[in-house]
Image (cartoon, grey):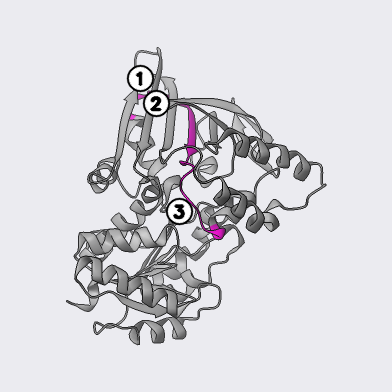
Amino acid sequence: MSRAGRVVVVGGYGAFGARVAERLVRGGGCEVVVAGRSGERAGAAAAELGARFSCEVGSAVVDAERVTASALMAALVASHSPHGRASVVINASGPFQEADYRLARACIEARCHYVDLADGRAFVNGIAALDGAAKAADVTVVSGASTVPGVSSAVVAAYRGEFERLEGIEIAVSPGNHFQPGEATVRSILGYVGKPIAMRIGGAERTVYGWQGLRLVAMTGLGSRLMGYCEVPDLDLYPGVATVVMRAGVEVVPFHLGLWAASWLVRAGVISDLAAWSGTLLRAKSWGARLGSDRGLMVVAMSGRGADGAARTASWHLVAGSGHGPYVPAIASVILARKLVAGVAVPRGAMVCNGLISLEEFMTEVGDLDITATVVS
């Protein structure tokens, strides 16, 4: 296999990174290296993948918080694989709300492409700061190749043509309770609970608060789930749309209401940051893991006016069963990495994952999983 076929997954043994690595190995066409700050865990994950798919999977030590370009290149060349350094690095390490662009900058200096699974609003939308350096190095740097905005923007792009004037985009996500996230994922969620969020509603900029604004969101085939406001990059991606709202929810109602109650303590200043409680809350989540189901959901609801001036809506509903919901945040990065190693034209520079994958590509990639989507007009 040529050097051009290598993809390194940093955080490749975590909740989402492990699924990224698995999809890449399963699909073939590239050499996969599992990386992270723990060489032991990376090696074990690589060995398990290699055994499952009867192929060679490399491993390397890469700490996204401390890596330099020289250390990155040395680690990749020295990884347990004979094919040279990476052409693509996927950053699945998180939590990105607390991160900087150290790994992305190291990739630019090492002249390899970079893709991350970030969904932190400031982190993703700030990636353009690296645009000049990425173009000068002739590499692609993509942030937000996750559920939002990677998949959500693909849905909007697929149905936007049905509207003469798009007036509203409302996104909602709720994982099945059986999914056990890692602490990085929990910290990223808790980081905005009770914190102010700038959100555009009815054409006006409003301040809302994380996990507040309780609302029941109906889902085809799943009934309704409680949702609250959350902060994601999509809130800044559609400047001409009057209403852009994101909500998220926990499937088990007492868990959701517990976070809602905690949001008021954060808002009042009684608790400064709920992320500090991530370990405790993760243990409580594990204790109640048998409650609820293994079904996750995502809704992208669009509203506006058709060519005839009449009101029009299109609501895309995704249901992930059999515990396959956690694959959804992994898919956009997998699609992009495959394009990059195959030499498919992808713009150079640093950019948000906004319309970089198509909805058709996404649905094709998840075709072997228990993930279905319907559209309600």
**Does the magenta segment cover residue 214?**
no
Please report the residue visible at 55 percent of the width from the left and 52 percent of the height from the top: 120
Q: Which segment did they paint magenta? A: 161-184
Q: Is residue 28 above or below residue 254?
A: below
Q: Nearer the viewer, residue 80 or 343?
A: 80
Q: Is residue 5 left or right of residue 357?
A: left
How many residues crowd around disc 3 within 10 Å: few (fewer than 14), some, or many (20 or more)? many
Question: Position of 180 compared to 344: left or right?
Answer: right
Percent from the top left, x then y, of residue 3? 23, 78
Q: Amino acid at mark 2?
A: Ser
Q: Secondary structure at mark 1?
A: loop
Provide residue 132's location: percent of width, then percent of height: 46, 66
In the picture, which quadrant includes the N terminus?
bottom left
Q: CA distance from mark 3 to mark 1?
A: 28 Å
Residue at point 25% right, 48% down? 365
Whether residues under marks 3 and 2 lie with C-beta atoms below 8 angstroms apart, the answer is no
* Residue type at the position of mark 1: Ser
Residue 187: percent from the left, percent from the top? 60, 56
Mark 3 and mark 1 lie on one chain; the one further toward the N terminus is 3
Query: Which residue is under mark 1?
Result: 377
In the depicted structure, whether residue 67 falls above or below residue 144: below
For the point 46% across and 48% down, the residue is 179
- The answer to which of marks 2 and 1 sits earlier in the sequence is 2
Quarter location, residue 371: top left
Whole-Å distance between the Cαs marked 3 and 2? Answer: 22 Å
Q: Residue furthest left?
A: 1
Residue on which disc 3 sits = 144
